[in-house]
Image (cartoon, grey):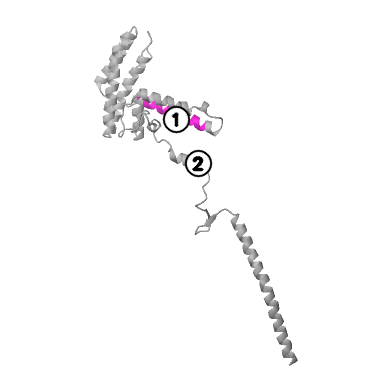
Amino acid sequence: MASLAARFTTACGHRKSTSKTRPQNRSTVLGSLSSLRRDFSHQPAQRRAGGGAAVADSSEPPAATSSSSSSSSSPAPSTHYDLFPATLPLGPPPSGHFPIDVRALRREFLRLQARAHPDMHPPGEAKTRAEAQSARINEAYRTLANPLLRAQYLLALRGVDVAGDERMRLDEPALLATVLEAREDIEDARDEADLAAVRAANEARIADGEEALEAAFRRDDVDAAKNEAVRMRYWVNIRESLDNWEPGKPIVLEH
């Protein structure tokens, strides 16, 4: 009987001790949860992708959004035409025209260079970017302002290298005769007045060539455009000889 009472007392004592320790265990767990919540609240908001890699929460803005948004809002130009949207809003042929208003192109070129000139930017990355941009604007203007370089550029975009193939010639006796006649007229000139008629005739040939190139590019006739570009090489060469003319100076024309 005494043994039974002792066991009952022991069991009751064990229950009491267990009931006393439960509140302690619960407070410990609650304290751990509270600490975990605090730690979690101070971590960057992230969620786990299926593979376990941390992915930034959509509510957090991505890093360097200003530079990425600015680059996306102003895509890099893909052709020389894209650099001059005011003068060439339609882009290159066939959507745009081959003849160009060179004076308008010049005005837009000067405006662009005023903004992109390296001296307008502080030393560092901004200045380096400005130097690259300025060089590209110069190259684009030089190419587009010259009808021969413009034609060669447009053909290069189509995979035809007219500029690099100096052996490309046209078997046209009338063309050769015109070039030789222009050379004689330039050599015989005594002053600028003697060159006026030669200059006017040559500018008319250049204008006709631009119209022919316009038609060729519009119908995407690469062979016709290539032949017209070769002809344009002669007319532009005559123009340069006229621009550089000096009394008694030898004339060298390509033929």
Residue in the picture at 31% in, 20% down: 235
Q: Is residue 169 visible?
A: no
| Picture coordinates of residue 224, whole percent (x, y) | 27, 30
Can you tell which mark lies on residue 111?
none
Q: Which quadrant of the figure has residue 242?
A: top left
Separation of disc 2 and disc 1 at Cα?
A: 25 Å
Q: Quadrant of residue 177?
A: top left
In the displayed orientation, state which residue is furthest to the left: 174
Q: Looking at the image, is mark 2 or mark 1 earlier in the sequence?
A: 2
- In this rendering, position of residue 120 left or right of residue 254: right
Please state the horizontal and vertical placement of residue 120, each as a whole percent of the image: 52, 27
Left or right relative to 43: residue 211: left
Looking at the picture, which amino acid does disc 1 mark? Arg
Please name the residue that numbered disc 2 is placed on.
66
Task: Using a 10 Å C-alpha cutoff, classify the residue at mark 1 as few (fewer than 14 neighbours), some (14 to 19) or many (20 or more).
Answer: some
Location of the N terminus (image quadrant): bottom right
Q: Nearer the viewer, residue 85 or 136?
A: 85
Which residues, given as a range, are shown in magenta? 128-146
Give the secondary structure at mark 1.
helix
Q: Residue furthest right?
A: 2
Report the residue at 66% width, 72% height from top.
23
167 is within the stretch colored magenta: no
- Neighbour tally class for label 2: few under 14, some 14-19, many 20 plus, Cα within 10 Å: few
**Front disc: 2 or 1:** 2
Residue 251: where, in percent of width, then height?
36, 13
Residue tagged 1:
136
- Looking at the image, can residue 242 be seen? yes
